[in-house]
Image (cartoon, rainbow, N blue to C red):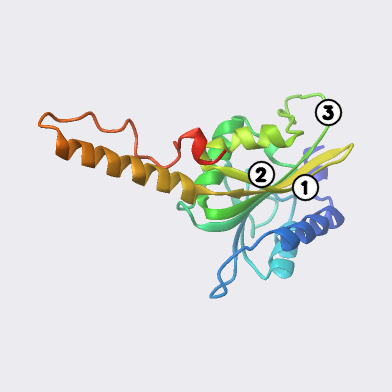
Amino acid sequence: HWHGKRGKDASARILAAIDAIRAHATLAPFTRHPRVIDIGPRNDIEPWLLAYHLDADVEAIDLFASSARIRRGDMHALPYEANHFDLCFISHALEHSYDLLQACREIARVVRPGGYVWVETPRLFTPNAHDRHRIEEVETLVSLFAEAAPEVVWSEVLPHKFRALVRLRKELVIAAHARRARDWYLRALEHPLPLEPPSSFWPWRAPQEVYE
């Protein structure tokens, strides 16, 4: 079953996703090609289509890579620096995650502020050892990426699948923490006794009201 999926040509589904991305996303500055991370491609077809139709530099990664051009790696610990990619494309792969929240945190880490995540998952299946998670609505997706101030710019719920394009407004998170750090510093100047610093300056923890 697993190896059968690896050899499947899903070009029609991928091209439909690319059309939605091109219609609703601004992927990169004009000075360079957009950088795309493709998580869990079945074979070389998916990253090739992304590179060709988005004029992008694509890094493909899969835990069970079937091609030498696909890097072997784990979505829960992506081997890339922070804020590197303009788009994460993860289609019919996120539902296989062992730790859904950790996988989404890793995706958010490697996508730049203002970058995008394309998520597509099947619907109305019974979770099992292979398809572990049902992500079937916008609210679920937003909750998974809540620490990166997500904005759903396009979504579609079909009888057999859910797909969405999400922009990660991490710049709002960073700005919120900069304000907290500034306010703490100004208060510290006004008091003779040391103040307890904010619990974390790490830019994933923004006040909820920042992006509501």
Residue type at mark 3 is Phe
CB within 8 Å, label 2 to label 1: yes
Placement of 206 over or under 172, stated as above or below: above
Whether residue 205 is visible here, answered yes or no, is yes
Q: Residue at x 84, y 53 (%)?
A: 13
Residue type at mark 1 is Arg
Q: Which residue position holds label 2?
A: 64
Q: Nearer the viewer, residue 61 or 103?
A: 103
Counting from the top left corner in percent of width and height, residue 45 is at 77, 59
Q: Which residue position holds label 1?
A: 6
Q: Nearer the viewer, residue 68 or 41?
A: 41
Whether residue 60 is visible here, answered yes or no, is no
Q: Residue furthest right?
A: 159
Residue type at mark 2 is Phe
Counting from the top left corner in percent of width and height, residue 98 is at 62, 30
Q: Which residue position holds label 3?
A: 125
| Earlier-in-chain disc, 2 versus 3 | 2
Disc 2, SS: loop
Disc 3, SS: loop
Q: CA distance from mark 2 to mark 3?
A: 23 Å
Counting from the top left corner in percent of width and height, residue 62 is at 64, 47
Numbered mark located on residue 30 in the image: none
